[in-house]
Image (tube, helix red, strand yellow):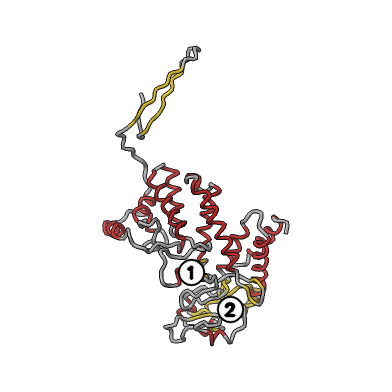
Amino acid sequence: MLTPKLNGTITVTATATDGSGKVGQLQINISGVVPVYATVLKAENMLLWQRSNGGWPKEPYNDFSGYDRVQTASEITRANNEKNNTDTTIDNNHTVGEIRALLSAYKGTQNPAYLEAAKKGIDFLFEMQYNNGGWPQYYPLRNNYSRHITYNDNAMGNVMNLMRDIFLKRSNLDVIDQSYVAKGQTAFNKGIQVILDTQVVINGTKTAWCAQHDAITLLPADARDYELASNSGSESVGIVRLLMTLDNPSSEVIDAVNKAVAWFESVKIIGKSLQNVGNDKVLVDSPGNVMWARFYTLGNYTGHTCQALFSTFGPNEPFFCSRVADAEGGGPRKTIAEISYERRNGYAWYGNWPASLIGSEYTNWKNKNGI
C-alpha cells in the first residue's frame, strides 16, 4: 500500500527475498494530491507582511515581536493593502532577519512557501546592491540619507553575512539553489571592496568609517541632523570585525584593520565617564575609565552646512549635536553639556564599543594570521 503525498513521478522497486535476485520496477505518475504542510506562526506572519518586491518594512514590527502572535483582522487587511508599498529596508536587521527566520521554518516543515519567500527576499537584496558594492538602507531609493551606503546599526554587515552564508552553504542557506552561490560570492566580495574604498583618510593616514557614505563619491555623509558626517566610534567596530573574519586576508585588508585599530587607540578617552546626575547625564572624572565618543571630526568639511562650526575643531575630536529644531540649534558642539537635554539623554554619545576589539580580538586575529 502506497500513500501519495506529492504530485510527480516515482519509481517503485521490488526485490525478491528468496535469493533469486529478481527485481521488478514500476513507474507511477501521481496527480491530484493537495499537499498539506506544517506551518509556523512567525513564518506565516512574515509571508503576510512581505512586500511584492521581496523585501520587508521596518514597521509595524520594528523589534520583530509582532510576528509572534496571531494577527488581527485589521492587521491582515492592512498588510494585504500595503503589499505594493516601497518601504522595504535592511534597517534594524529587517529583510535579512525575515529571510533567516523563514529558512529556519522551512528546515522544520519543508513548507515550500517559506523557501520561495526567502529566495524572493534574497533576490531583492541582490537587486538592492549598488554596483560599487554598497547597500542603501532603503530600496527603492528615497531622496534622503537612506540612499547612502549604510553601515549604521550593522545594516550592511547583516546583508554581507547572509551573502557569505549563501556561498558557504551554512546557517540554513544550504537549501538555496546552486545558482545563488556565485551571486552571493560576488556580492560579498564587492561589499568588502567598498568597505576598503570607504575607509576615511585623514592627513594621509587611514582611520575608520562613517556610519553612512555617499553612494557616488564614497565620502562620509550626513544622516539625521544630529548625525553629521564623521568617523564613528561605534559603527566602525562592526566593520573591522567583519574584515577580521576573512580567511587569508589580503595585504589591503590587513592594513585596513591595523590602521583602524591604531585609530581607536589614538582617540580613546581616558579618565572620564558619563553618569546620571539627578535626571541628567553629566561627564565626570572617572580615574582609569576608558571610553570612546560616537562621533569624531574628519579632516575636511569644505562646503558643509556646518563649516563655520567645524572650523573650530581639529581632526579626530569628539563632537555632539542637538536637533536643528532645538533651542540650542544644530551643528557640532565640543561638549555634551552644550546640546539639548533631550538629545543629551536620548542618544548613545559615548560607549566602550571598541574595547574588546582592540584587545583580545585583535591579538587573536594577528596570531591566527601570523601578523
Which of the numbered marks, if any, corresponds to residue 204? none
**Distance CA(mark 1)–CA(mark 2):** 19 Å
Of residues 132 and 35, the one drawn nearer to the viewer in this rendering: 132
Quadrant of the frame with the C terminus: bottom right
Few, some or many residues within 10 Å of mark 1 (<14, 14–19, 20+)? many
Identify the residue at horizontal 71%, vertical 57% (top origin): 367
Would residue 238 be seen by someone viewing this image from the given angle? no
- Residue 150: image location, x then y, percent: 50, 66
Q: Quick one: 41 or 46, which is closer to the camera?
A: 46
Residue 194: image location, x then y, percent: 56, 64
Q: Is residue 345 above or below residue 62?
A: below
User: Disc 1 residue type?
Assistant: His
* Residue 247 placement, left or right of 127: right
Residues at marks 1 and 2 touching, judged by CB atoms closer than 8 Å = no
User: Residue 245's image quarter?
Assistant: bottom right
SS state under label 1 = loop
Q: Position of residue 270 (x, y in %)?
A: 65, 76
For mark 1, what is the residue? 148
Identify the image quadrant of residue 246.
Answer: bottom right
Residue pushed farthest right? Answer: 370
Placement of 56 over or under 34, stated as above or below:
below
Task: Report the amino acid beneath label 2.
Answer: Thr
Pick the quarter of the image with the N terminus.
Answer: top left
> Which of the pair 342/332 is nearer the observer?
332
Q: Residue at x 49, y 83 (%)?
A: 305
- Residue 183 in the image: x percent, y percent? 51, 52
What residue is pinned by disc 2?
A: 297
